[in-house]
Image (cartoon, helix red, strand yellow):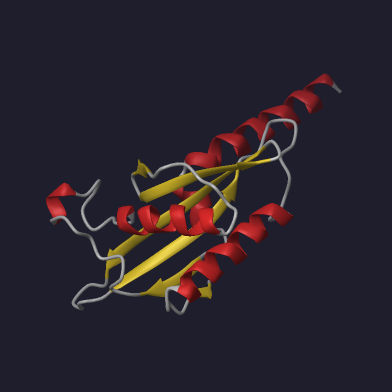
Amino acid sequence: MLGMIQGIFKQRAVNCLKFSFPERLRRMSEIVFSTERFAPGLPEECQVNPNVLGFELACWLGPALAKDGFVTSYPHPEDWGWYLDYSREGKRFMIGCAGSRVEGEQRYEWRIFIEEARSLFRPGKGASAEAEAVMRAVLRCLEAEGVSAAFE
């Protein structure tokens, strides 16, 4: 019995550690769109990683979400792009903003995703109502900016 309980806690700990890894992030629902609106203002060598963008998108998204009642942090860098922290009623969320130039073209493809932080004792499955509310707010912000986006 003790071994089974330890196994459950070990698996939950592994699941919690996955929060910061891009492999888990790619498996989530994402909002995907193309636009020049968030093209980088600085040259490639100034980016966090080559052709890994998202700073301009995150800088725009934070204040846009705040106007809709979802107040976030300032952007933070990651290997895959940038993210905003968002908290409400004891729940924490990461709003990821990533993009890259489409090879051989003069356009950019962008992705925004929401990942809820899971605790060891509350691993949860699926998107919470709050995460879905943030996603709807992101879509409203993009639509207000004239950007057509879709879930992938």
Is residue 152 depicted above or below 75 in this figure? below
Q: Which of 17 and 94 is in front in this view?
A: 94
User: Horizontal placement of 29 versus 52: left or right?
Assistant: right
Is residue 112 depicted above or below 115 in this figure? below
Residue 113 position within the rendered picture, expressed as x and y whole percent measured from the top left: 51, 58
Q: Nearer the viewer, residue 52 or 133?
A: 133
Is residue 4 depicted above or below 82 in this figure? above
* Point 16% across, 48% down: residue: 46
Furthest residue toward top:
2
Residue 150 position within the rendered picture, expressed as x and y whole percent measured from the top left: 52, 76
User: Horizontal placement of 33 versus 13: left or right?
Assistant: left
Residue 47 position within the rendered picture, expressed as x and y whole percent measured from the top left: 21, 49
User: Horizontal placement of 98 versus 72: left or right?
Assistant: left
User: Horizontal placement of 44 versus 81: left or right?
Assistant: left
Furthest residue toward front:
67
Is residue 150 depicted above or below 88 in this figure? below
Q: Nearer the viewer, residue 17 or 8?
A: 17
Query: Quadrant where the N terminus lies?
Result: top right
* Point 26% across, 76% down: residue: 107
Count of numbered tags: 0
Residue 79 position within the rendered picture, expressed as x and y whole percent measured from the top left: 33, 45
* Point 58% across, 63% down: residue: 137
* Point 42% across, 73% down: residue: 145
Q: Nearer the viewer, residue 104 or 38?
A: 38
